[in-house]
Image (cartoon, rainbow, N blue to C red):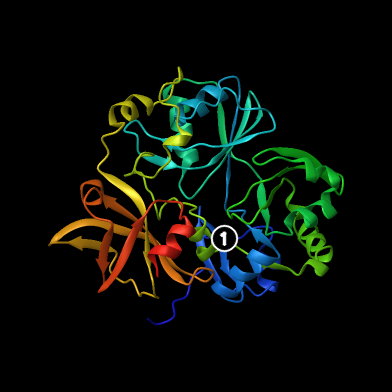
Amino acid sequence: MADKVLSISRRTRATPFSLRVEASGVRGYTVYNHMLLPTFFESNEFDYWHLCSDVQVWDVSCERQVEIRGPDSRRLVQLMTPRDISRCKDDQGLYAPLCDRNGGIVNDPVVIKLTDDHWWISIADSDVALWADGLAQGYGLDARVREADIWPLAVQGPKAEVLVARVFGEEVLGIRFFRYKMLPFRGREMMVMRSGYSKQGGFEIYLNDATLAEPLWDELFDKGQDLNVRAGGPNLMERIESGLLSYGNDMTRDNTPFECGLEGFIDLDADIDSISLPALRKIRGNHEKQLMGLVFDQMLPIDDFEIEADGSLVGDIRSHSWSPRHSCYLAMAMINRKFLSKHSKIDLNGKTAHIVDLPFDFTTVREVSK
């Protein structure tokens, strides 16, 4: 396939870190929430091994913060998610699927509580602000919805804690997963949360002053030279190995949390006012499809994403990648549950795949890929 070029314009917004990203040798972008998201620098596999061994700085400003403020802000956030947010602390984020009145997933963000009247929804790739504002108006809520001027910067990898502590101080060491502290950088306090879109460990820094973007980037690189710090971005190989879902790829509004294995992040029996709960309670146990893992023992070109068996369409590939660490090809696929009840393997492009649960259990993967 011939090389393709991403045409960048005002509709594909740059970020306060974009000049530093370009100077670091970015070689690929995607568009995410109408913004540029770097995808790789050296190569996908080089970036993968570096992420797993050292530390990377990611411009993830595309994780836009839908800010909801006002007396009815908690009620609005609760209407949007079937996860009970009533016990969320003021220093906490919750992974909370947002679902519509039919139970379809609108987004799968981290919901962050600043105070009872002030929330951020750190979104995946869909226009949540428009939906939230429509709900606020439709329900007559005293809640203001806007996209906040917040520019997340992720620091990921096994050496991330050391690097972030060098920049923000020893308080970083006491931050628990999905918890945050407001810590100073050059006289400006900003949120530092232990989180990020990898399983290698790390933090997200919620920059709230665009003029400090380049100084923050530069200081992370200055203080991380001995840690072999590099620029990076969410890595397809690492995120599939880790079983991290991508909204718009592995799931869309046509899917429910049950189909995607997210039932552990919803509270069906909670006494909460959520627009999706009535539908989800009816759907419980009756979904027709399930997101599963596929394991091939060799590299596989996948051009046709549909999965057929005995002349019938039984599923489709959602994401796929070679696994450098485990030397097998992995895919995430939405598959008919009736088919799953009778089959543990499936043929695709003349190759046989073992069907496994997500996230991948690599003890099992090694056995089935032999």
Residue 144 horizontal/vertical position (percent):
57, 29
Q: Quadrant of residue 162?
A: bottom right
Judged from this view, the residue extending furthest toward the bottom is 2
What's the residue type where badge 1 is placed?
Pro
- Which residue is labeled 1 in the image? 234
Q: Is residue 310 above or below residue 205?
A: below
Q: How many discs mark residues in the rendered view?
A: 1
Quadrant location of the C terminus in the rendered image:
bottom left
For residue 318, side relative to residue 187 (left or right):
left
Q: Quadrant of residue 158?
A: bottom right
Along the line of sight, which residue is nearer the eye, 106 or 283?
A: 283
Question: Crowdedness of circle 1 by 10 Å Cα count: few (<14), some, many (20+)?
Answer: many
Residue lying at 44% horizontally and 80% vertically, measured from the top left = 3
Residue lying at 25% horizontally and 74% vertically, measured from the top left = 350
Residue 194 horizontal/vertical position (percent):
68, 45
For residue 27, say whether it is visible. no
For residue 256, side relative to residue 14 (left or right):
left
Quadrant location of the N terminus in the rendered image:
bottom left
For residue 191, side relative to residue 226 (left or right):
left
For residue 140, side relative to residue 35 (left or right):
left
Residue 308 horizontal/vertical position (percent):
20, 62
Task: Determine whether the residue tagged by mark 1 lies in a helix, strand or loop.
Answer: loop
